[in-house]
Image (cartoon, rainbow, N blue to C red):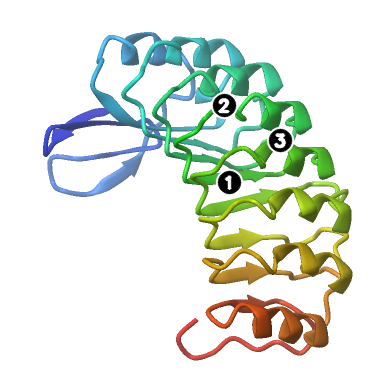
């Protein structure tokens, strides 16, 4: 069943479903038509879609679903900035994860800029620049930020827009054009615990300098870095 209820919370998972035998199977319905019916369930809090289930037209049905808190749009190849705009109208959204959103641009991030309760933002695969980071600077509730560009156009200058995100704990900056110089903008993020700089120009010296300022921070991915046994 796509619609499951427990502890008073509605979840719609079109990615997979639980069989009567307690097993999980991937759903084969790869269209967005079910979203028309989702809006008839006003208490839905979690929505998970994938591939052809994610479309600009289908996401129009999310408008007015004020109880939605978590949205997962997986392998969202067909999603554009217009479609993400519908997600940007959800007043109580806390978690948004978009993977393979290859058509998304900085404009998509701008349309999410009013989600004041957003705690987790993951956007992967789009054409993002420093402007994307400028658009998130007002998301004061953010704890996790992963903006993973398909084209690495995020630079040191973009990091200055993150300096006011006081609640930020987990930041993913892999595959960007940042260097040691840009890390100075992160020194005021006292709650930052994890930073990934894989495939950037950040060095061990730059990472060590930042960790001196933020003793609770673990930086990973710089040349010579090795994961601890707990990672």
Query: Residue at horizontal 60%, vertical 16%?
Result: 56
Quarter of image, res 203: bottom right
Residue that mark 2 sits on: 114
Mark 2, secondary structure of its residue: loop
Element class at badge 1: strand
Residue at (65%, 65%) from the top-left corner? 188
How far is mark 3 from mark 2, CA to CA?
A: 10 Å
Residue 126 shows in the view? no
Return the disc, 3 or 2, that comes first in the chain's sequence. Answer: 2
Q: Nearer the viewer, residue 28 or 183?
A: 183
Query: Which quadrant of the rendered structure holds the N terminus?
Result: top left
- Give residue 223's position: percent from left, percent from top: 80, 84
Question: Answer yes or no: do the residues labelled 3 and 2 have beta carbons within 8 Å?
Answer: no
Mark 3 / mark 1, whichever is N-terminal: 1
Which residue appears at 58% of the width and 46% of the height?
122
Q: Which residue is disc 1 drawn over?
A: 122
> Disc number at residue 136?
none
Is 38 drawn above or below residue 140 in the view shown? above
On the picture, is 81 further left or further right than 41? right
Label 2 Cα crowd, 10 Å radius (few <14 / some 14-19 / many 20+): some
* Lower position in the chain sequence, tag 1 or tag 2: 2
Q: Which residue is mark 3?
A: 135
Asked whether 1 or 64 is in front, the reply is 64
* Image-based side of 20 in relation to 203, left or right: left
Pick the front one: 145 or 158: 158
Q: Is residue 126 shown left or right of residue 71?
A: right
Q: Is residue 115 above or below residue 163?
A: above
């Amino acid at each position: 069943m796509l619609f499951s209820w427990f502890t008073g919370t509605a979840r719609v998972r079109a990615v997979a479903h639980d069989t009567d035998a307690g097993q999980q199977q991937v759903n084969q319905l790869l269209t967005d038509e079910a979203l028309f019916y989702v809006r008839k369930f006003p208490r839905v809090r979690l929505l998970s879609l994938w591939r052809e289930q994610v479309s600009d037209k289908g996401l129009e049905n999310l408008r007015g679903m004020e109880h939605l808190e978590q949205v997962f749009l997986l392998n969202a190849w067909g999603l554009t900035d217009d479609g993400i705009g519908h997600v940007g109208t959800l007043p109580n959204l806390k978690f948004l994860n978009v993977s393979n959103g290859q058509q998304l641009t900085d404009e998509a991030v701008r349309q999410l800029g009013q989600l004041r309760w957003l705690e987790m933002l993951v956007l992967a695969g789009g054409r993002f620049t420093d402007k994307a980071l400028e658009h998130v600077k007002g998301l004061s509730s953010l704890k996790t930020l992963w903006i993973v560009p398909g084209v690495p156009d995020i630079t040191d200058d973009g990091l200055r827009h993150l300096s006011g995100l006081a609640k930020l704990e987990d930041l993913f900056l892999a595959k960007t054009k940042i260097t040691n110089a840009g890390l100075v903008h992160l020194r005021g993020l006292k709650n930052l615990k994890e930073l990934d700089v894989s495939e950037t120009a950040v060095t061990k010296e730059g990472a060590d300098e930042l960790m001196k300022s933020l003793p609770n921070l673990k930086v990973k991915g710089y040349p010579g870095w090795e994961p601890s046994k707990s990672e």
